[in-house]
Structures are given as structure tokens and as C-alpha cells.
Image (spheres, rainbow, N blue to C red):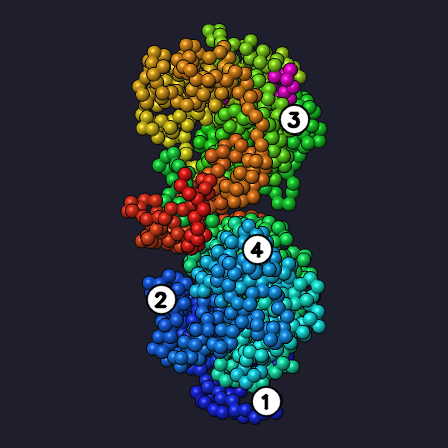
Amino acid sequence: MQQFSIRNVIGKPLLWRSLIYHQIRKNHGEVKEVLHRPIKKILVANRGEIAIRVFRACTELGIRSVAVYSDQDKMHMHRQKADESYLIGKGLPPVQAYLNIPEIIKISQENEVDAIHPGYGFLSERADFAQACIAAGIRFIGPSPVVMEKMADKVSARKSAIAADVKVVPGTDTPVTDLKAATDFVKDHGLPIILKAAYGGGGRGMRVVRKIEEFEELFKRAVSEATSAFGNGAIFIEKFIEKPRHIEVQILGDNYGNVVHLFERDCSVQRRHQKVVEIAPAQNFSPSIRNKMTADAVRLAKSVGYQNAGTVEFLVDEKGDYYFIEVNARLQVEHTVTEEITGIDLVQSQIKLSEGYSLPELGMPQDHIHMKGCAIQCRVTTEDPAKNFQPDTGRLEVFRSGEGFGIRLDGASAFAGAVISPYYDSLLVKVIAHSKDLPATASKMNRALREFRIRGVKTNIPFLLNVLENPKFLSGTIDTNFIDENPLLFQFEATQNRAQKLLRYVGEVMVNGPSTPLATNLKPFDIEPQVPEVPAGFKPSKGFRDVLLREGPEAFSKAIRNHKGLLLMDTTFRDAHQSLLATRVRSYDLLKISPFVAHNFNNFFSLENWGGATFDVAMRFLHECPWERLQSMRNLIPNIPFQMLLRGANAVGYTSYPDNVVFKFCELAKQCGMDIFRVFDSLNYLPNLFLGMEAAGKAGGVVEGAISYTGDVSNPKRTKYDLNYYLKLSDELVKAGTHILGIKDMAGLLKPQAAKLLITALRDRHPDIPIHVHTHDTAGAGVACTLACSEASADIVDVAVDSMSGMTSQPSMGAVVACLSGTDRDTGISLEKVSQYSAFWEQTRTLYAPFECTVTMKSGNADVYENEIPGGQYTNLQFQAFSLGLGEHFEKVKKAYAEANKLLGDLIKVTPTSKVVGDLAQFMVQNKLSAKEIEERAEDLSFPSSVIEFMQGYLGVPYGGFAEPLRSKILKNMSKIEGRPGESLPPLDFSALKAELEDKHGITLDEFDVMSAAMYPKVCDDFLAFRNTYGPVECLNTRIFLVGPKVAEEFEVNIEKGKTLHIKTLAVSEGKNSAGEREVFFELNGQLRSVFIRDKSVKEEIHVRPKADKNKKGSVGAPMPGSVIEVKVEEG
């Protein structure tokens, strides 16, 4: 096959191009004179990738190129690729700028342009433009105006086809401009019909009408669209052929009557008549049909005297019959695939033909044109296929193309920093693949598209990939209904875009400060905590979880009870940091130490690492998924049972939920690796407790029914919560089937003597049930209490590693291990390993300095025996007091807490009832109210909502009933809940909630996301939106996450196994753009990237156009500028 190159096209060195010469050639026995008129300078009356395509051909041929550009395109690449460029259409609308014929001619004349290439679209099929060029003495690179006029008018083209004996589809003989004429055609020929713009293509001004009631509206829309796009609203009407293949034949004609074809292209993959994927040649196409069709195309072109490049288009029905539909008298977008299979440069050919060369001179007699292999073109556009191909606009933050052998890219806007405007076509780049056959070419294209990384705007790449992988597409036989009949093409894998999202987060923190509020003025230490080594290649030793998995909850419970030593539950992963660091410890640090824990503490009873406040804090402040945290920990710690805190019927929330939500929650928790459910109720309200226990048991978990402890069983004066109260409660829990009996001393009120009394009585009462004691070290007596529990035959106690113990946290693990070492209650834990474990957390704790409780709390305080504030809340109340400007009055807050507790009837105080008491206490201090004033003025005060809801019964019924008459005064005529709060709630429809969330956030969600939304609707909404914007921030190290990096700092981010991002911060711009944004510069894996971040400190007025709110029904965003055709709504 002859290759089309510069030398064999010109036939002379480039030095000779300035010559004008004559040549004699023989044509069909006649001698004709051939005039060669070299072109020196070409102006391209177009924009984008086709302009650049022509400029490249000019450069290769030694011709100077000229670009024109609209004001909206002043930053566009095509103006930079030309030798000269000139602004056009200043003050005109974006499209009209490129339709301004007088100005284009003027610029050409002023700059010695001797030829104009129209590209495609815009003026490319306007005969008056071609005529204006010729009248100005400028060559038009395309057919003659006469031929253009004949071919651009689909009715004239149709007549020409009939005259050339080419079969046509039944249709109107002349363009239709009014509704009546169109209606007459429908009456004569029936439906379906197709409306087409008579003076343009590209799918614009085209509508299919199948129902008579839609006819008038669709006709008006087609006319309006044609008028807007082509300046002429005339419509051509044809009978519509169902399920056709759209085949087009590429032709070339010279000035001497020669016309050749370059075979055909299959353009059947269309959406709304707009081509999406093109293939050359057509697959599974009969050679006889190919020969007839190409011969018809050539015959038609010769009959009208066609010159230069063009396309003759046909529809092929299911029987193989084909019909002429139109001629595109210009270069086509998809000309590239023809170039690939024939080796012929169509743009250079256009230029050479315009210079007067004949097809034989160019080495292109028909018998020299052959096709080799298969080519596919995919148009990568900035359209969102998930939103009905809505055009997207914005800045390309990242652009990385797919390249390699057999791949060609034709683009113009494809570079990082390019701004995709709403004014023009959404084409970003054309990707062309060429290989031996369709499957090989599709595979090559698939690979190339998967290499693309485009960030900042949506693209149609996910859709294109689905097309390329579709079996019907790969079979090669498709019709124009292919997209409509394959809904699976619109099921997309979510793109992750993790790196750019993380850069956006880091930039946000650098410009606007921490994303999570910091409780103190301290900054995280700039250290990297050292993780103790674990043996590589060895699995951790078996632990109690192996017993549980092998034998089930009942046998597990017996094994625990038969164990001789004291078993420990480590709270470091949950309650310890909840008490000391405001629950802010991140998965990043928990997972770093997890392998060490698995390998060195296999004889832990359990690891408390989930539930309680960690669930909502993970989403609300740490922007992490709590379910992913649990799954990740389970993967690293397979041998130690996990334990969570379940608030009975409140699950991990602060309110009541439908019963099916609680049951489903426990099921999912078990599925993610949870083993033991410590079930409690903030009021020891048995109906709530029983529901939680039943849910945990049904999920297959170990049930630890826990009694919340308050008061002092060793003090005979404290009669409300005496020993008999706890014994009766324990009887109920054992009767309900608890596997383990828990004592939850959330405030550290259990004194050593009380512990001995209570645990001894419980052991005597229930000799076969393991007893598990939880306490806090707020008063400093935690270790003594724990040892007393051990002496009284408790089976399990809670401790925290030394550097995370003490004060409002749990007793010291090392102290308990050391005190029992060598006794019959020896824990079996290595004190050396505890020290290594503690050293890691001692370093890690410095990263959480902004939440460090020791800023305001320097030691434990025995006044907890008076105020009874739970450990975690004690820390939080201090922080809250300081944040409200009451830091110096914290002693008043503690005193008010005790008074508030008495006002409410001496409650058991644990989340959420502790919050009720705390809110009332803060309310009293802020408003300087005494307990007496509260009682006297209750009817007139606006109490905190938590207090009102408690009094209504939303948390259950407190032991001894509600405080009266305070309750009646507060509630007045408000409603009250009778019985268990969640009992009357209807079941939650998880499927409906999932659909609602996916519609709101535009992403695919799983059942864990749905459960998070069921627990915390607003928090989950915010979390999903945050993650969608900023990505997996849990992968960032803690200092970077909290306060961001320093300028010029380098750091790594492991986003998954084997994928590490190397990031360096370069600079933050001092100035702001018109939107009040600063540009933050990074180096990512050695490549420059930047993000624009709105500076929230900007005070000057920024004009921001209102945007559609996706959360408001009826709020509709326009994807691009346009005109309102008709308003269907009337006032009222």
C-alpha cells in the first residue's frame, strides 16, 4: 500500500513550493492542463481540535497557519498552535463570533491569507461563506459553492441522488419551514418520521417523532435548534427507518472530474443522533454491499462535480438494503479512522487538491487505495453520562492521557489548567486506536482510556468503557438503537480520584485551617511514633476469639468462667481516648499498632475498639467511616475478640430507633468482625436493655448485659441504688440469657470496699456467669478497685495501656499486670510488652495535643464521688466550659452537675442521660440559676432540648419515676411517651433510604452507609459529602490531617496496598482570584499539580452566581447557556 507522505505528495523538495507550474496529464484519453497554485498561508475558520489538526498539516507541508479565536477562547490551545492568531467577533456571543463571515474575510485579506479551511461545524457547510471567500480572491478548501449549496440542502442532495440512480428514503422534496407543510407530510406518509436540519448536521435540529401528539412540540424544537446552530431553521422530513446501521463513505474529488472513495465508516453508536464511537471499516459488512455502496457514493459525487473531501451517508436496514440520506460537504469529526486504515492524510489531501493536484498525482487512483486492519475513534467529552450526559464545565485540575502503540490523540483542551467553558462543544479529545481487527482495537482503546486521568470535570469515559466491553459491540453488528437498548451501558464503576481530592483537603487546611475544631491551642508534635517490631511472615498466636469461632458464645462463656487468671479487656482503642483525647484518635494510628497487639496480647479477653461515641465522632470530626475502621482492625487482629459498647435500644445513637434498625445494626457489626456486645441502658431501663441484648444475640454475638453503676453500695445512707437493686437487675439479665454479666462503672464511683461487696454478692448469686467490671480512675482509686474486684472473683476487668490510663480513663494495665504477677490471678501478660505498647501511645498521644485533657486537668479528682460525672463526660465538660468562656468557673459547673442530678431525681448518669444532666448544669451556670430557682421558675424557663425530651420519656423511664412536680412544670401540655420509646416507631424502609441517599449524593452506597444514615442522618449526609469532596483523609498522617503540612514539606500517603502518593507542598499564592480563591501548589509523584481553595477569611464582597441546590426539589441547574423556547407554567 502506498503511504501518503510529504515527499510523494508534493513530488518536489519544499524549497520549490513557491513555484507555479503547469503539467500535462492524460485523463480518459483526453489531454488536460493541470494548474498547480501553491498555498502560502491558510486561515482556519474554526476552533478546537480540528483547527489544530489543520495547523499540523500546514506545518508538515511548509504552509503558514493562521488562527481566529473568540474572546471566550483567548486562553484556548488552538490559538497557540498557529503561526499567527487574531481575535474575532469581539462583543458577539461565543458561537456568533465564529459565524462572522465579513470579519473572517477582513482578517484574511489584511494578513495575506490565500486559503481558508472551514473545519467542521460553524461555517463549514455554508455555501455563502465559500462564495464570499472566492469573491475575495481567497481559496476555500472544500467543494465549490454550487456543489455545497446543492449538497448542504438535504432536499437538493436527495434530488441529486435520485438523478444519479441512488436509492433514497421517502421524504420531503423541499425544505419545510412551517408546521402545516410538515403536517401534510405526516398525513401522507404516517409515522415514525425524522426531522433534520436542512443546513447542518451533528445531530442538532434532529428529532424522531413516533406519536402524533408530540409532533408539534418536537417540530418547534427542531426548527429552533436549527436556527440557533446554523442560522436557518428549515427542516427536512423523512420516513424513519427503524434499527438501521449508519454507514458513511469517505470520498475525495479533484478539480478534473476524478472521485475516489476511501471505504466506509460505521457510525451506528449514536446518542440522540450524535455520533459517540466510530469504526472503520464497518464490521460484518457484506463485500457486495460495500462495493455497491461505495460505487453509488462515487457516482453521486461525480454526477454533481464534487471536489475535495466529503462524506456520503447511508442507512442500512436489517435486510441489508441501504438508502442515501445526505452528503456532508466537509471534513468529518471521524475522518481519523479512515486515515488510520488507509494511511492517507485527508487534511493534507484537501490542501493538495485545493492547490490543483489531481488524485493520480497524489498517488490515489482507486486501485491504489487499500484498507488495513480496524480503527476505532472515541470522543472523550466533558459530559456526565450518569446525569443524562449533562455537559460539565470547570478547570481541568489533572490531565493525563492514555498513549502507546496504536493510539492517536487529537485534542485541543486537553491539558492541566485548561478551563472548559459552557459555550462550545464538550469534546475534550478524540482517541483513535488502530490494530489488526475489532477485538484487538477495542482492547487497545480500552487500555488507553483506562490510563486517562481527568480531574476537575466529569467525562464520558466510564460510558465509553462500557461500550467497548459490550459483547454486542465486540460482535461488530450494531445499529443506531444500540445505546437505547443496552441500559447496562449506564451502570458505572465509581471513579475514585483519591489523589486530587486529598490535595484539595490538604490545600483547604493550609488556607483555612483545621477541618475539625481543635479544643486547645496546642499543635500536634512533629514526630513519627515508632511502632514496635512484629515478626514478619508469622501469623499471630491463637486467642480467645478462636475459641469463640470454633465453639460459639455459650462455650466461650464457659471457657472464660473456667479460666483461672484475671482476664483483661484493653480499652485503649476506645474508652481510653474517649476519656483523655475527646475520642479523636484516628484509624491511622490505631491500625499502625494493631499488628503488634495481635502478636503480643493474644491472651487479652477482648479489645474494646468500637461503639459508644466513636461511631459518630469518626464521621463528624475525623471524616472516617466507622465500619471501615472496624473491618480494617479485624483484618489486622484476627485472634483477639472485639468488644463494643451498645446503648441498648439506642444502639450507638442518642435517640430511639425503630426495632429493625437496632437488629440490623447488630447484624452488620457482627458481619464486620464484632464479637462481644456490651449492652447497657442509661437508665438501666429493662425494656431497652432486653431489646439490645436480643438484637446482639440474634446477630450471633456474645451478649454482655451490663448494669450501669451509680451511688455507693457500701454506704448505708445511699438507699436508692443499694445492693439489692443491683442483685435484682442481675437476676433479670441472667434470666434474659446474657452470656456475661457486666458492671459498668462509668464515673469511677466503685470504691474498693464497694467493689468487694458487690462482686462477692453477684458471684454468690450467679456462680456460673462470668463477671466483667468496667471502671474509671477519675478519683485515683482505679487500680485498687480493680484488684478488689479480682479478689472478689471477677473474671474480667477493664484496663488501658499505661500511657493512656489514669484520671478519667481506665486503671493502668501495667500496674494491674505487675500487682498480680506470680499470684493465682496472674494475667499472663508480659510487662515488657506492655511497656513497648505504652511507649508507642506515649509518642502518639503528642499528636493529639489539641485535644489533650491534661491542658485543663492535671490530675484525678476525688470530688467525682460527689458530682458523679462519668469519665468521658468529665473531660468534655471541661472543654465545653472553656469554649463557652466558663473555664475559670468549672468548679461551679461540677457543683451544678450534682444539683442538676438531684433535680432530675438522682439519675444513673451515662450517655445519653449524662448529657441531659450536663446540659442542665451548663444551663444553670450560664444563666446563674440555683436549684431552687429552677424549681420555682420551671414553667417560665426555656430548658435545653435534651432535658425536655428526657422528661417526655424519649430515653425511657428512670428508676423510681420522673421527678415531680418539675416534670409537669417543664412539659406543661407537651406529649409524653408511654412504654419503651422505640416500640411505637414504624420499621425503617432501608431500600427507600438507600435510594434517597444515592439520589442526593450521586454515588452508589452500601448497606453500611445506609445504616450510618439511619443512626445519624445529618452527620452521615455531611460525611458523605465531605468524602466525595476530599477523599479518604484517613490515609493522611495525623499531623497533616489536623493542621496541614508546612510549605516545602514532603510526605507520603499510602492509599492502598502497593499505592503510595509522594507529595510535596510548594507554595500558597498570596493573591486571590476574582472568586476569592487562593491557588495551592503541590508536587505529586514528581508532577506539578495545583488546587484552588476559597479563602474563607476574605471580607470583600464576592459575586457568586446562585447554583442549583441538589437537596431542594424543583431546583434545576442549566448545564449550559441557552434560550428559553417556551414557558409551560402560568402564574397560579
**Reading the chain from its start, which is encountered first: label 1 or label 2?**
1
Q: Which residue is mark 3?
A: 698
911 and 311: which is toward the camera: 311
Is 889 left or right of 231, judged from the image as shown? left
Mark 1–mark 2 Cα distance, whole angstroms, equals 45 Å
Give the x, y percent position of residue 53. Answer: 49, 71
Task: Report the amino acid beneath label 3.
Answer: Lys
* Badge 3 or badge 2: first in the primary sequence: 2
The residue beneath circle 4 is 209
Q: Tell me the distance, in whole angstroms, between the alpha carbons under discs 3 and 2.
A: 73 Å
- SS for callout 3: helix
Structural crowding at the residue carrying mark 4, measured as other residues with C-alpha within 10 Å and reported as few (<14), some (14–19) or many (≥20): many
Q: Which residue is mark 1?
A: 27
User: Do the CB atoms of the residues marked 4 and 3 lie less than 8 Å apart?
Assistant: no
Residue 860's place in the image compared with 299, above or below, is above
Looking at the image, residue 248 sits to the left or right of residue 424; the answer is right
Q: CA distance from mark 3 to mark 1?
A: 92 Å
Amino acid type at circle 1 is: Asn
**Residue 897 location in percent, x, y?**
39, 18
Quarter of the picture holding the C terminus: top left
Image vertical order of residue 200 relative to residue 881, above or below: below
**Mark 4 residue element:** strand
Q: Position of residue 999 (x, y in %)?
A: 52, 42
Question: What range of the chain is rendered magenta?
Answer: 733-748
Mark 2 secondary-structure assignment? loop
